[in-house]
Amino acid sequence: MGIARIVLNWRGSRALLIPLLGIALGAIGVPLAPHYALLATVWTLAALLPQESGDFSRLLITMISGGIARWLMLDWFGGTNILACFIAIETVPRAALIAMAWTSRPANTGAIDKFLASLSTPVAVAAMIIGAIAAFATGIRQGIVILLGCYLLIRAIRWFSYRMLGGINADTLGITQLLSELGILLLFGCTSCKMVIT
């Protein structure tokens, strides 16, 4: 069991730990906010992105590129309520991972079968509610943009995964979490995006 599969072992009701971990990471990020590189490193090491293979080189490339992207986007960060924004940045992507898992069929690869089979409706709905609360804590308009963006991202990734693999796998869940996080960071960072949400 590699670090990339730790999240997939949080089965059943323990799947709620995934968005709750996001809340903790968001809160931890507040005192680290002045130190973008350190914060990006902490969030990257704690991402625990699910991955289909145990290929360490792929995981390392994903972590390095994700860490650099987080660092650059944190440098542009312009959210007004840092605590709420950071919690949303780390919680909503993990709720999106649960939403993707709950609403999709597996690609018969085996790595996520037990995780998907143990994911009950109450746990999945509770995780998505946690994600929605985290999104709306940043503001009504911001919350709508975040949730709509994650919904469209999930649809696009699922469509691509179904087309290429016939279903989702651990890589699908990992890319959903990573792109959702980077998208929310971008939302609070780019000037044009801030004009839309303020």
Image (tube, helix red, strand yellow):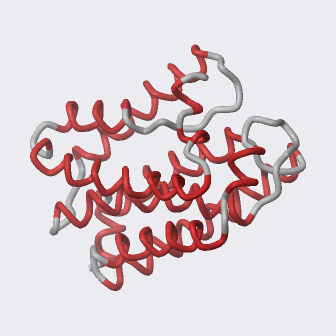
81 on left or right of 156: left
Which image quarter holds the C terminus? bottom left
59 and 187: which is toward the camera: 59
Residue closest to the far bottom = 140
Give the percent coordinates (x, y) of residue 170: 68, 40
138 on left or right of 4: left
Instruction: Give the mark count.
Output: 0
Residue shown at 50% from the left, 66% from the top: 127
Give the percent coordinates (x, y) of residue 91: 39, 58
Residue shown at 77% from the left, 49% from the top: 168
Which image quarter holds the N terminus? top right
Q: Is 81 above or below relative to 172?
A: below
Q: Is 157 above or below relative to 142?
A: above
31 on left or right of 88: left
Give the percent coordinates (x, y) of residue 109: 84, 36
Residue closest to the far top = 57
164 on left or right of 191: right
189 and 33: which is toward the camera: 33
Residue closest to the far front = 13
Query: Which quadrant would residue 110 be assigned to in this image?
Result: top right
Residue shown at 36% from the left, 68% from the top: 193
Give the percent coordinates (x, y) of residue 167: 84, 51
Query: Which quadrant would residue 188 be assigned to in this image?
Result: bottom left
Residue shown at 72% from the left, 42% from the top: 112
112 and 13: which is toward the camera: 13
